[in-house]
Image: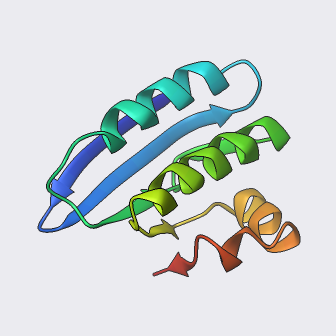
Amino acid sequence: MQVTAKIFQDTLIINIIGELDEHTAHYARTALDSQMQESGFNQIVIDLSGLEFMDSTGIGVLIGRYKKMKERKIPIFISNPSAQADKIFTMTALYDVMPKIS
């Protein structure tokens, strides 16, 4: 599991690489919170092109970050989801709160 981030213009771009499950949730939660505490952005794009697997714990991690950013009125968007992640986001209606962008 690896989480990288950079700010481009007014967007925080986060890449999640590897597996987001119960074994990596604590690391992912900590890494995402650390990046999202920074300033200088008004929206977040989470790039899932490197995400190989996600379970319900991973969904919980992302929903938790969504709730924190909602309090700050910062929208989160999902880009490049793998087929497996796309299926999960579609089935759970997560795209309703974190829309997919291309």
Question: Where 2 sits versus 53, above or below?
Answer: above
* Quarter of the rendering containing residue 61: top right
Does 44 sit left or right of 71 as displayed? left
Q: Position of residue 57 (x, y in %)?
A: 78, 36
Residue lying furthest right: 91
Q: Nearer the viewer, residue 45 or 40?
A: 40
Coordinates of residue 68 in the picture (x, y in percent): 51, 49
Q: Residue sitting at 17 percent across and 68 percent down?
A: 10
Image position of 70 (left or right of 92): left
- Locate residue 60: give its quadrant: top right
The answer to whether residue 1 shows anywhere in this view is no
Reply above or below: 29 against 86.
Answer: above
- 15 sits to left or right of 38: right
Q: Residue at x 32, y 38 (%)?
A: 35
Outermost residue toward the front in this view = 71
Compared to residue 21, the image places residue 39 above or below, namely: below
How far across and down, in percent of the image, does residue 54 sit? 74, 43
**Image quarter hosting the C terminus:** bottom left
